[in-house]
Image (spheres, rainbow, N blue to C red):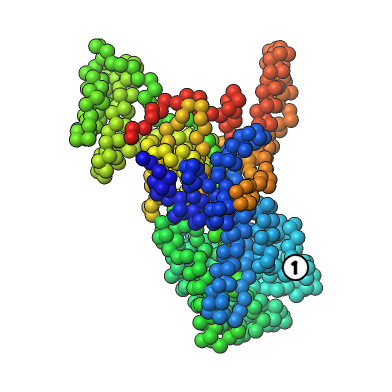
Amino acid sequence: MWTVDDSTDIYGIENWGSGYFFINYQGHVAIAPHKDRKSSIDVMDLIDEVEYAKDIEFPVLVRFPQILEHRIVEINEAFLGAIQEFQYPGGYQPVFPMKVNQRKEVIEYTITYGKKYNIGLEVGTKAELLAALALGMPKEALIICNGYKDEDYLKLALSITNVNNIILVVDLFEEIFDVIRYARELGVRPKLGMRIKLFSRGSGRWVESGGESAKFGLVTSEALQILRILAEVGLIDMLKMIHFHIGSQITEVRTITTAVTEASRIYAKVVKVTKSIEYLNVGGGLAVDYNGSKTATFSSKNYSLREYANDIVYNIQKICDEEEVPYPTIVSESGRATAAYHSMLIFKIIGKKNSKEAFLKAPTEEDPVQLDDLCSAFKEMNLSNYKEHFHDALQNREDLYNAFNLGNIGLEERAKGETLFWMVCKKAAQFARQAEDESEDFTELRKIVSQKYIGNFSLFQSVPDMWGVNQIFPVMPLHRLREMPCEHGTIVDLTCDSDGEVKVYAGDSEGKEYLELHPLIKDEDYYVGIFLIGAYQDTLGDYHNLLGLANEVHVLVEGEKYKVLHKVKGDTCKVLLDFFKYDTRDYINRILRTCKEKGECIDKKELDQIEAELNKAMGGYTYFTKLNGHTKIKESDDRPCMP
Ligand SMILES: *Cc1c(COP(=O)(O)O)cnc(C)c1O
């Protein structure tokens, strides 16, 4: 019997779910925003509610603001715990980097939930600064301005220097001259920071953000020069922060130790020049274990949150002690670790590719011998001979294609051959699995029988990093988890792009090539979720094939109940066309004009019909929508699984 525990195992949900996601006794995925199962939501209840309300369609992106809250609390408590453990005399200040998720609601939740820790924001561009200013942050919360800054950016930040707690971080040496000039023009004394280029660098995909050749930060000689310049113009006492950031998703704790040690030394040397330095900002980099393997591989990490905080606090303290300098307030900018868990995408499977058994017709007398052989193979196959039959089947298939190319057999025979071959392979794969066959044959078999489940979503819109940097995001069915998932295959998206396919699945440290899936059932929906997509994916996503933003629901969980806080409509086709500068107002007139030019006449009824369809499509969702009332699977050729 297949149990919930088997599903928990096979999908690794408790490894990557970090306590927020689990499978409940009904075999449904459940979400516990406070890592407390007594206060959780069955995802199928939410799905039913969305289906029942009929106001939005799938795919739906679900946000759990309380997970954001829980992440903020956990990160802060880790630092406060470390500070207490080592009796570090300085404080801690969290900052959320806007580039990780600029969605207004997400930033609002972050500010609201982070208020008790005085959470600040880090911005990297003019537009991000403008966005941050729109939110009415408390005056004490830090706004850290990073990135390359032009006149508008600098002047905007400088002009509100006395209204907000803004720190202008010099990322690029030449910036210092502009800062001084504009500050003088506006008559303000800005708080300043320096981003330092460390010799230590991260590891993994974003290694280039640190080290000597990094895009941002000052080399030692530049930093020294800035100190001299600031002293000359009488601004040296405004230098408040030393900042570094060696890249995102740091997979090894050792890397963090080295970087913090180096940065603390630099801080100590600078603070001896100017006592004004208050903050040591350790940037981001705190990783998320996307595949749940707890290893130093790219989609994982080999340390815990508390280890991370301990490492930072301990090393800063050690070096401040050695150098006999004041203890800075520690600032960290964890974006990924704060935001990743809070959202998931739910979509439906709309069909399957590569399932050929639907059209089987029995072979007849006149059929070529290979068809007969395939048929017998299917009948006679067992645990001890499945390999031979599989090899023979490969040969038979080859012979049939050759015969077809030579014109000796027709389409009917070719079709029968393909179907029979597929059935033989499916059966062989089942025996191979039973025999725990690990040979190359089995790998090939798996590839042949693997099915493509077509998901109603866009990988490019919803999980762009899966495509762009081959990052793993956990993907799994959301229900039927008490049933054995006896199919295996991959999930492909709606785009007409062969890259729109989930190619690696969470489950072990290397990632799996295939996902275990359930056979589709006629007139029943099959729901799949992609998890941990709250960091970077929202605004990195693109409009490939003009598939737009998904509908959203924001959900609060209270004990055994939940509340839909917010429903946000995704893009309609019209929104996308307008975004890409099509003039959608005039479609019908243009069609009329073209007809007139061609001297054709088009009757009123046909024209009305065109207009109605245009309007309907234009105002509709960019994703697959209802087919005659429902998107349910119309036909299913799946057979029940073998035990
Ligand atoms: C991107 C970025 C961050 C966020 O890094 P995470 O690894 O997502 O925490 C923090 N600080 C700076 C300066 C950044 O550029």
Q: Is mark 1 within 8 Å of ligand 1?
A: no
Res 298 seen here: no
* Percent x, y of residue 85: 53, 77
Tell me the quarter of the image containing the C terminus: top left
Image point (63%, 34%), residue name: 52
| Residue at 63% in and 65% down | 95
Would you call the spot at circle 1 few (<14 residues within 10 Å), some (14-19), or many (20 or more)?
some
Q: Is residue 289 above or below residue 610?
A: below
Q: Is residue 444 left or right of residue 139?
A: left
Identified at 65% across, 51% down, the residue is 103
Tag 1 secondary structure: loop
Residue 573: image quadrant is top right
Residue 457 in which image quadrant: top right
- Residue 55 point in image, percent of width and height: 67, 35
Report which residue position mark 1 lands on.
Answer: 139
**Which of the 4 image quarters holds residue 462?**
top right
Q: Is residue 11 above or below residue 227?
A: above
Q: Nearer the viewer, residue 64 or 282?
A: 64
Residue at (65, 39) in percent of width and height: 571
**Camera-nearest residue between 475 and 406:** 475
Left or right: 375 as drawn, with respect to 525: left
Instruction: Answer left or right for 13 relative to 393.
Output: right
Judge left or right: residue 444 versus residue 594. Answer: left
Q: How many marks?
A: 1
Residue 236 location in percent, x, y?
A: 68, 81
Q: Name the residue furthest bottom.
A: 324
Q: x%, y% of residue 56?
A: 64, 36
Residue 169 visible at all: yes
Placement of 285 over or under 325, stated as above or below: above
What amino acid type should be assigned to the residue bearing mark 1?
A: Lys
Which image quarter is the N terminus in?
top left
